[in-house]
Image (cartoon, rainbow, N blue to C red):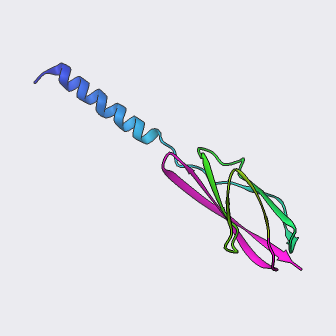
Amino acid sequence: MNTSFTRLSAALLISGLWLTSCSKKPDACFTIEKGIPSSKVNDEVEVNAGCASDADSFVWEWGDGASDTGIKAKHKYNVAGNFTIKLTAKGDGKSASTSKPVTIVQ
């Protein structure tokens, strides 16, 4: 067997495994900058995913059927209640999600 070919094959296999394992799953993280612990109906709730890592896109679900994109977002709830804000951070074909509760009062 050709030793150069064997070494090249091993090097390609190792580098291929390294490239595959190098791709990290995003870390979904966010803060509620305005509107916590509670907010009033029609007041803005502001969120920021600046603490997330290895992500290049962000999808927000507000828990009332509305959604937004971007590293920062603002939303107004038009009814009182308890809602869950969900962030999905995406990068390198992978995604991660996290969520936090928010209470909206009259």
- What residue sits 71% from the left and 48% below the top? 51
Residue 55 x/y as whole percent? 60, 46
x then y, percent, for residue 84: 70, 71
Direction top: furthest residue: 4
Examine the image and state in which quarter residue 80 appears. bottom right
Residue 90 horizontal side relative to residue 61, left or right: left
Between 1 and 91, the one nearer to me in the picture: 91
Q: Which residues are magenta?
A: 77-106
* Residue 25, horizontal then vertical, whole percent: 52, 49
* Numbered-mark total: 0
- Extreme residue in the left direction: 1
Name the quadrant of the N terminus.
top left
Which x, y percent locates residue 62?
A: 70, 68
Report the magenta stretch's main SS.
strand
Residue 79: within the magenta?
yes
Question: Horizontal placement of 63 versus 23: left or right?
Answer: right
